[in-house]
Structures are given as structure tokens and as C-alpha cells.
Amino acid sequence: MEPWMWAVIAVAVVAVLVLAALWIWNDRRQKARSERLQRQFGTEYDRAVDRDGRKQAEEALQEREERVHQMDIRPLSEAELRRFADRWHATQADFVDEPGGAVAQADRLVGEVMQARGYPVGDFEQRANDVSVDHPQVVENYRVAHGLAVKHQRAQASTEDLRQAMMHYRALFTDLLETDESVPDNARSR
């Protein structure tokens, strides 16, 4: 065999090895990205993949991350924590006499907390997407609660539906306050 043929074969073998290495590297990078997004977003990742397929869902989740990381999300001040906690307790107390009104109040209150934290107040789906970046474990609560609130607006919700909505709102509300309970300790001692 001619020396130039050996050179062509060697170049071809090197090219195949480089392509294989690039494919393996890209595959590992893709798996690492998928695992990171799955860990971060939890059930929200699964929801997005079921709806849009893995590639499109992962691109959308990364876009959410970038969008939210450009926002000025901040913790609430002690005064805001007390004010929101007091309003939450009033909303829960209202549930006994007016469950539907309390659910509507809870929906508004959660929106106000989000806005105070720095989340934009767009349409519901955008709010849920934004909050999913920092609060993925409770965003599903928000979706379910909001769905039940909409069901109530259509006069299709039972009292049990409204109770469930309040529980879901409370989980998100507590997480948004970034306390272990819906009432900060200093608010209780007043």
C-alpha cells in the first residue's frame, strides 16, 4: 500500500475518533444539563417535557432561568412579612364565612407577595413560569389553586375544592415568604 494511502486512512481514523469524542462529550453535556434541570425544576420539568418534548422543554426552562436571574428578586422586609402574614390570617379566617371570597383574596395576596418580591405581574402562566425557577416545589400548588379559583368563578367549585385551593395557596404563600411557617416568629409575639 502506498504511503499516501496510509496517510488518508490515518486522517480518516483520526476524524472518526474526533467525531466520536465530540458526540460522547456532547451527549454527556446534554445529560448533565437534563439532570441539572430535572433536579432544579422537579415536577415542573416533567410537566414541561410531557407538554413540549425534552429538547424544547429544556430550552424553555433555561430561558425561564435566564429571565428570572435578570430580575431583582428580593426577600421581604420584616414589616412586609408581618403585614402579609396578618393579611393571610385574615384571609384564612374569612374562609369560614365566605370560602369563595377567601380563595379570591388568597389569589390576590399571593400575587401581591410575588410583586413585592420583584416578580413581574403578567398573566397567570407567566407568573407561574417565573416563580417555578425559585420555587419549583410549590409551583404546582399555584397552578392547582389558581385552577380551582377559576373553577369557583364559573360556579363549579365545591367547598372541598375551595378548601384544597386554600391549602395550595398557603403552601406557595409560605414558600414565597421564605419562612418555615406562614407567620414569622416576630409577628406572633406582638
Image (tube, helix red, strand yellow):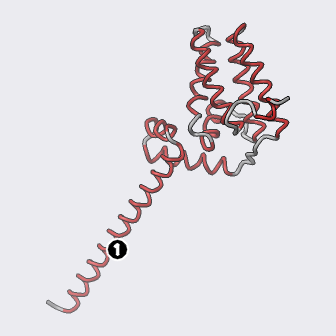
Residue 48 vs residue 190: left or right?
Answer: left
Relative horizontal placement of residue 181, taking residue 45 as reference (left or right): right
> Which of these two is toward me, 130 or 38?
38
Alpha-carbon neighbours of circle 1 within 10 Å: few (<14), some, or many (≥20)? Answer: few
Residue drawn at x 75%, y 22% is: 89
Position of residue 186 relative to residue 1, above or below, is above
Above/below status of 117 relative to 12: above
Q: Residue most toward the front?
A: 189
Residue 34, image x, y percentages: 45, 51
Q: Nearer the viewer, residue 7 or 76?
A: 76
Q: Amino acid at mark 1?
A: Val
Q: Is residue 114 above or below residue 104?
A: below
User: In the rendering, at what x and y percent does residue 88 appear?
Assistant: 75, 24
What residue is shown at x 80% (from left), y 25% (from top)? 86
Q: Quadrant of the C terminus?
A: top right
Please say if 108 is above or below 93: below
Residue 121 placement (x, y as % from top left): 73, 34
Q: Taking 43 as reference, is 121 left or right? A: right
Which residue is the site of mark 1? 18
Residue in front for this viewpoint, 105 or 62: 105
